[in-house]
Structures are given as C-alpha cells and as structure tokens.
C-alpha cells in the first residue's frame, strides 16, 4: 500500500522515464485490506466518501506523515514512528461507526514524549476527518517500556480533554501538527 503522495511521485518518475521505481509487495498491500471480514465494509467506506479501504488508509497516513516530532526537527514518517502498515480499519461499532486503529512506534523504548505523540496523532485525525470515527491509538506491542499505561492515557476521553485544556500542551500539539505549506 502506497500513500497518495508516494503513488504520485512514482507515477511522475515513470512518466519522466526514470526507471528506478521502488519495489512494493502488492500481495502484502492487498492482505492488509483482505483481513477485513465485516459485512458491508465497502458500503461503509463509500458512505464515508472513499472508494475503498486502501484509499481511507492512505488518506489517514498522508495526514500523519507530516506530524513533527516534539524533540527532533523531523516528521514522524522520517523517524519511522508512523508507517502505512500501522493503520487498520476494523469492524464498525454496532452504530455503524468506522473504527480506525493507528499503531505507532516510538524511536526509543523509554521515549518520554510517546503520550504527546499519541495525542498529536489523535488530534490530527479528528480535525481532518469530518465524519464520525472511533479512534484507537496504540504503541506498537513491545516498543515502549510503559506501553500499557500510555495506551490507556491516549485512549481515555477524559484524559485527552484535560490534556487539551492545558494551554502549554495544546500549543505544543498545535506546533507538531501544523502543516507547512
């Protein structure tokens, strides 16, 4: 699965005669969508305004890839904190609300800003996707020393609301998610 921007750059390079096209595993790409076993997934995705599950995943990834790391002058994509394979479309809720799971991988197992990164991911998706979603944000299993505690924090509505009431923290989130044009 390639993000929209990567697909576009591949198309542009192939049209310009550039023969160096990175290899992708189409079987891996399709398997990410094939594991969806819920009824009417295509109908739900179309209702949300996307052609298919892959397009929804790519849209989410394209949003997340530009988030800046709070400590380093790099994006989360540059640091491999977020990656396309870490976005999952899961079975919708009983009210037919799409469930999106985003898995991220902090750069070090004791990253002190992992909670902030999870908060940035949540805020960026919530602000840029206009339809109702249930977001589950998780640290990749085994990637952080306190992943269970952090996962609990970044998926608790009350803790999220309290964090965003803190002006300093809110400002830091705004800086990290700001799109540079």
Image (tube, grey):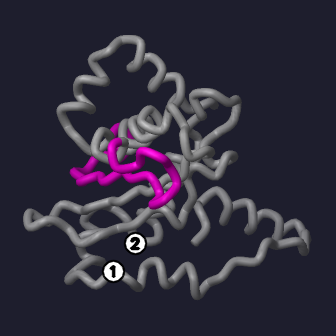
Counting from the top left corner in percent of width and height, residue 27 is at 58, 88
When the figure is inspected, residue 86 is found, relative to residue 133, above or below; the finding is below
When the figure is inspected, residue 25 is found, relative to residue 66, above or below; the finding is below
Q: Residue furthest left?
A: 95
* Residue found at x 39% / y 20%: 170
Counting from the top left corner in percent of width and height, residue 180 is at 62, 30
Query: In the shown orientation, is residue 121 left or right of residue 37?
Result: right
When the figure is inspected, residue 23 is found, relative to residue 18, above or below; the finding is below
Secondary structure under badge 2?
helix
How many residues crowd mark 2 within 10 Å: few (<14), some (14–19), many (20+)?
many
Nearest the eye: 2 or 109 = 109
Nearest the eye: 109 or 46 = 109
Q: Quadrant of residue 18?
A: bottom right
Query: In the shown orientation, is residue 143 left or right of residue 11?
Result: left
Residue 129 magenta-drawn? yes
* Residue found at x 18% / y 32%: 158
The segment highlighted magenta reads: 126-149
Counting from the top left corner in percent of width and height, residue 154 is at 32, 41
Q: Which residue is mark 2?
A: 53
Secondary structure under badge 1?
loop
Q: Report the label total.
A: 2
Counting from the top left corner in percent of width and height, residue 103 is at 44, 57
Q: Residue furthest front?
A: 145
Q: Which mark is residue 36?
A: 1
Circle 1 or circle 2, nearest the eye? 1
When the figure is inspected, residue 34 is found, relative to residue 93, above or below; the finding is below
Residue 74 magenta-drawn? no
Q: Earlier in the sequence, mark 1 or mark 2?
A: 1
Q: Which mark is residue 25?
A: none
Figure quadrant of the C terminus: top right
1 and 2 marks in contact (CB < 8 Å): yes
Query: In the shown orientation, is residue 44 left or right of residue 176?
Result: left
């Amino acid at each position: 699965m390639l993000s929209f921007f990567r697909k576009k750059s591949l198309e542009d390079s192939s049209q310009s005669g550039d023969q160096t096209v990175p290899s992708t595993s189409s079987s891996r790409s399709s398997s990410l969508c094939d594991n969806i076993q819920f009824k009417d997934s295509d109908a739900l995705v179309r209702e949300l305004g996307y052609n298919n599950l892959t397009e929804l995943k790519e849209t989410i990834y394209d949003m997340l890839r530009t988030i800046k790391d709070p400590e380093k002058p790099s994006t989360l994509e540059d640091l491999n904190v977020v990656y396309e394979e870490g976005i999952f479309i899961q079975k919708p809720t009983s009210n037919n609300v799409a469930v999106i799971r985003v898995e991220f991988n902090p750069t070090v197992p004791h990253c002190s800003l992992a909670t902030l990164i999870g908060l940035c991911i949540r805020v960026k998706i919530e602000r840029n996707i206009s339809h109702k979603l249930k977001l589950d944000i998780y640290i990749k299993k085994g990637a952080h020393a306190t992943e269970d505690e952090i996962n609990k924090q970044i998926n608790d509505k009350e803790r999220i609301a309290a964090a965003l009431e803190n002006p300093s923290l809110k400002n830091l989130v705004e800086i990290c998610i700001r799109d540079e044009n």
